[in-house]
Image (spheres, rainbow, N blue to C red):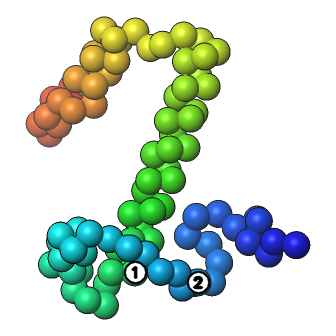
Amino acid sequence: MDDDADLTPGAGPSSGISVTLSAGTLRAIRERVGRRGVSGYLERAAQRQIERENLDELVAEFDDTHGPADPEAVAAKRAKLTAPASEPGTAA
């Protein structure tokens, strides 16, 4: 029986594995987090990748059911979300 079957990304005890990275990638990681921060950095990176893949699957399922999103509607929402914040005292 697999004791890890019910664990979600980031949950459960730590487990050691061997990972092979290119020298340049490893150097870039160490420059950001130091030698002792590599495992934590890779853990967070793996969690973000899993989240992205899960989101991609969710969007694909939504598109299969409802069709793709209207590009103009997406652009309008994006503009609204990325617009500069209103100044205090002005209507939103």
Q: Amino acid at mark 2?
A: Ser
Q: Which residue was labeled with disc 1? A: 39
Q: Give me the disc on residue 92.
A: none
Placement of 77 over or under 34, stated as above or below: above
Q: Quadrant of residue 12?
A: bottom right
In the foreground, 25 or 34: 25
Q: Quadrant of the N terminus?
A: bottom right
**Visible residue check, residue 92:** yes
Q: Relative to 30, is 36 on the left or the right?
A: right
Q: Quadrant of residue 27?
A: bottom left
Q: CA distance from mark 1 to mark 2?
A: 11 Å
* Image point (27%, 31%), residue name: 81
Tell me where residue 61 appears, x and y as whole percent.
61, 25
Position of 89 with respect to 66 (left or right) is: left
Quadrant of the rendering where the C terminus is positioned: top left
**Mark 2 residue element:** loop
- Toward the viewer: 72 or 68? 68
Where is residue 3 drawn, in percent x and y?
A: 80, 75
Q: Give above or below for 85 relative to 61.
A: below
Q: Position of residue 18 (x, y in %)?
A: 47, 80
Name the residue at 39% across, 63% down: 45
**Circle 2 residue:** 15
